Structures are given as structure tokens and as C-alpha cells.
Amino acid sequence: MIGGRRRKIPNTFGFEVEADCFLEYGSVEELEGLIAGKEITSPFLHIGQGSNLLFCKDYEGTVLHSCIGGVEVTAEDEEKVAVRVGAGVVWNDFVAYCVERGWYGAENLSLIPGEVGASAVQNIGAYGVEVKDLIASVETINIRGEKRVYQKSECEYAYRKSLFKKPEMKSVFVTYVNFALSKQEYYTLDYGTIRQELEKHPAVDLKTLRRVIIDIRESKLPDPKVLGNAGSFFMNPIVPHAQFEALQRQYPAMPHYELDADRVKISAGWMIDQCGWKGKALGAAAVHDKQALVLVNLGGATGKDVVALSDAVRASVREKFGVEIYPEVNFI
Ligand code: EPU
């Protein structure tokens, strides 16, 4: 357990920010010890790898981080496998582990930054799969030391949303996530250019699909170690069908995804690109030149620089398309 000291807060934007107190725990028992010892003083913030956070200044409080590890098979038959995974396991390591063992389901989520605990909070998603499709239940402990297991149906999962993102759930910490994966071959291939990319390979298998997903991501999304960023900065907006139809009359090429009879998800990246923002900078913060949904730190940017850029981008999209886009990244 690492505790108590003032320390730099890890964050993929590469901002130089510190917490008054940084506590790391490696087991549920250690976390229970911190709770019982009243070491988690308010305000507090639980983070994963800081891959979806935007710090505008130092955090005057306690930052908590789980290092709970372990991947344990809890049930298994010929068709499926149930796996219990520690919240501190690196998400992409878990995907690699699944692919290695021939467990189907997680491969489209290859290379998403962050840890298993945060994946269940954020409902990470990519290439037609969301982590909620794989989750069976989420184990938690709250600031009073009470444990509770939330079944998937209780987690209120929706696009980049969950019960755990609600402000009233701030004092509930994810300790383990239980996944249900398939041992029977199946793939999700309908998103974008995946099928096209797979045609370059002799056969479809888990390892090949993981490779293809990694190649697509690496071609568009900047490596945070090289260029600070938090993945998609904005969510794709969901608009009523009538509004989409009006937009489509004006912009027939607008990429979209019909959610149901009433609602259409439209592409924020495409709209930002159409506004001419791709590759443009405002001070040391910029819109990524290969994927306009991503804002990057060119070096030495602060959270405030990125917020200023975000505000300018949102204003452009509002003006040109009459659509409000909202950050996916959490502002701290
Ligand atoms: N597009 C442009 N210009 C751009 C960016 C996108 O024209 O600068 C167009 C693309 O050509 C495509 C459409 O917009 O027709 C959608 O683009 P893309 O497939 O890159 O996906 P996205 O909607 O921009 C979402 C997720 C990503 C995820 C990809 C693939 C959100 C907020 N983002 O991006 O997730 O990897 O789909 O599934 O839903 C993340 O959340 O951090 C993330 C990277």
C-alpha cells in the first residue's frame, strides 16, 4: 500500500498536477483498512489510469487508486467462461489474456487505455462492442465499508454511461468486475472498415481481429505516451430522428447510426472535421490531425488550455449544425 504522500496524479493528457494525498491499495482488505482508519478524507476522487480525466488544477484532497489484480475463472463449461477480474488490472492486458485463451467477446475493445474497474464505470466501447455486453456483475465497497454486488441489470448501462458515474455514487468503489465470455467462436465485424481490413488476412480468428483493431486504432488515435490525450474528448450526440433528417438533407454524407425509431447517433468527429478544426491548435492544445474527436496536448498545455479549445470547438459545431456536443472526458 502506498499512502499519504503528496504525489503527481497520473493522467494521459500529461498535465503536471498533484494531489494533496495519494492512496493506493492492493486488496479489498487494504481498502477496508483505509476506510476503517478514516484515512480517506473528503474530498476524495477515485481514479484508474487517468485516461478519461481532465485536471484543471491540483487536486486539494485525496486521490485513490486500486491496484487490485488477478484474473480468476469462477465457472466454466464448454460454451462459456465466467471470469472475476481485479479493478486494477490493465484493460488491454485483460483483452490480451482473453484472446490468448480463446475467449470471445473482448477483442474489439483491444488497446483501449485504462483499467478494468474504470471500464465498468465508463462503459467503454469501440467497433460495435461495449463492455456492458461482457459484464455479468460489478463488486463494490463504499466509503462506509459496505460491500455490494451490482448485477448488470442494476448498473443502468447506456452509451458511455452507468450508475457508477452518477454523483451520488462517488463514494462507491469498484473492487472486482465479473465477466461472462464465450468459448464459442463469434465475432462482431459490422463496424466501419473492419470486414474490409480482415479481407487482407487469410482467415478470421481472435488474434487476427485483435491485430486489425490495434492497427486501426494506432492509425487514428495518438499514443498518450507520445502526445497527451484522453481518447475521444466528446461523445457522439444522439438527436431526434426529425432533426437528423433535416441535417441529412443539408449534409447527405453525414455519418450516422440509427439507435431506434426515434433516435439517431451522429458523428461528432465528422462535424468537428467539417468545421475545419482537424489539426488546428489553440495555444498548446490541438484537435488531433487524424481523428477530430480527440484533443491533444502538444506539450506544456494545461487543463485550462484544453477547456478553452473544447469551448471553441463546441461553439463551432453549435453554429454550423445547431447540435450541442458534450465532453466524454470528466472535468476535475
Ligand atoms: N470522421 C471524420 N473525421 C474525423 C473523425 C471521424 O470524418 O476527424 C468520420 C469517420 O470517417 C467515420 C465517423 O466519423 O465515418 C466515425 O468515426 P470513427 O469510426 O473514427 O469513430 P467515432 O465515432 O469518431 C467512436 C468512439 C471511439 C471508438 C470508435 C470506434 C465515441 C465518443 N468514440 O469514435 O472511442 O474507438 O467509435 O468504435 O463514441 C473513446 O471513447 O475514447 C474512443 C476512442
Image (cartoon, helix red, strand yellow):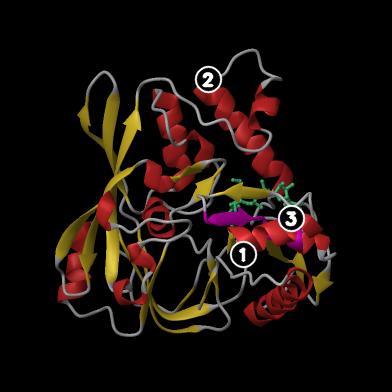
Kind of residue at disc 2: Asp
Q: Is residue 13 visible?
A: yes
Kind of residue at disc 1: Phe
Which residue lies under the disc numbered 3?
248
Kind of residue at disc 3: Gln
Q: Quadrant of the N terminus?
A: bottom left
Image spot of residue 168 (x, y percent): 30, 76
- The 10 Å Cα crowd at callout 3, few under 14, some 14 to 19, many 20 or more, is some
From the viewer's perspective, is 299 left or right of 149? right
> In this picture, which residue range is highlighted in magenta?
262-271
From the viewer's perspective, is 71 left or right of 258? left
Q: Is residue 230 visible?
A: no
Q: Is residue 244 above or below residue 95?
A: below
Q: CA distance from mark 2 to mark 1?
A: 32 Å
In depth, the one of 238 and 309 nearer the eye is 238
Camera-side mark, 2 or 1 = 1
- The 10 Å Cα crowd at callout 1, few under 14, some 14 to 19, many 20 or more, is many
Camera-side mark, 2 or 3 = 3
From the viewer's perspective, is 329 left or right of 252? left
Q: Earlier in the sequence, mark 2 or mark 3?
A: 2
Q: CA distance from mark 2 to mark 3?
A: 37 Å
Which residue lies under the disc numbered 2?
205
Q: Which mark is residue 234?
A: 1
At 49% from the left and 27% from the top, the residue drawn is 187
Q: Is residue 168 magenta?
A: no
At 48% from the left and 52% from the top, the residue drawn is 124
Q: Is residue 74 above or below residue 296?
A: above
Image spot of residue 132 (x, y percent): 38, 47
Q: CA distance from mark 1 to mark 3?
A: 21 Å
Mark 2, secondary structure of its residue: loop
